[in-house]
Image: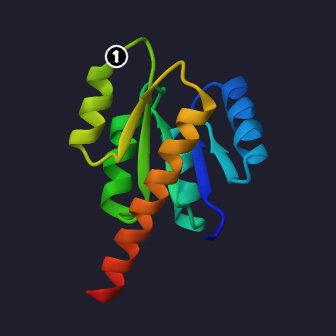
Amino acid sequence: MSRIHVLVVDDEPDFLKLIKRRLTKRNLDVDTAASGEEALEFLRSGNVDVVILDVRMPGLDGIETLKEIRKRFRETSVIMLTGHGSMQSGIEGISHGAYDYILKPFSIDDLLERIRAAFEHAQLRRKEGDKA
C-alpha cells in the first residue's frame, strides 16, 4: 500500500505542528494549511488522499471549504474536525459530503484509524472513476 498523503487544515499553528509531527511519525505524508483558501490552493497543485479539515476558521470556514472540495476534488476524502463538543458541525459536514468527523480533543490512534478508513474509501472512489 502506498503512503497516505494527508492535508491538515486548521487556523491554530501549534495544533498544525503537533499533528504534523505525530502523523509523520506514523509514516504518513503530511502537509498543512492555515485556512480554507490555502487548502484549496494546495489541493490544486498536490495529490492529497485525505483532508483533515477544522470546521471553525476565519475566512472560508470548514463547511464552505468542504463544499468546494466536493465540487473540485471529488475523490479526496475529508474528515471534519469539530471542537467545543459540537456534533452538530460534524453532522453538517457529513451532510455536505465529508467522509467522517472527529471531535476535539481526540486520540492520535483514533485519528489514524479514521485516516486509514478514509484513504481506503478514496481508493475505491478512484477505482470506480477509472471504470467510468
Q: Is residue 17 among the parts visible in the rendering?
A: yes
> Where is residue 36 drawn, in percent x and y?
49, 41
Left or right: where 68 falls relative to 45: left
Which quadrant would the C terminus be assigned to in this image?
Answer: bottom left
Kind of residue at badge 1: Ser
Q: Residue at position x 33%, y 45% from top?
A: 98
Q: What percent of the width, then of the height, locates residue 43?
A: 53, 59
- Looking at the image, which residue is at 21% across and 41% down? 95
Query: Which residue is nearer to you in this view: 41 or 125?
Result: 125
Q: Where is residue 37 in the image (x, y as percent from the top left)?
A: 50, 45
Front residue of 5/117: it is: 117
The residue nearer to you, when weighing 108 against 50, is 108
| 86 sits left or right of 42 in the view | left
**Which element carries disc 1, helix, strand or loop?**
loop
Residue occupied by mark 1: 86
- Tally the marks: 1
For the point 48% across and 43% down, which residue is it?
Answer: 114
Q: In this view, does 67 lie to the left or right of 80?
A: left
54 and 49: which is toward the camera = 49
Give the image quarter of residue 11: top right
Residue 75 on image: x %, y %: 39, 66
Residue lying furthest bottom = 131
Tell me which residue sits at (78%, 44%) in the image.
Answer: 25
Q: Quadrant of residue 108?
A: top right
Quadrant of the image containing the N terminus = bottom right
| Furthest-top residue in this view | 84
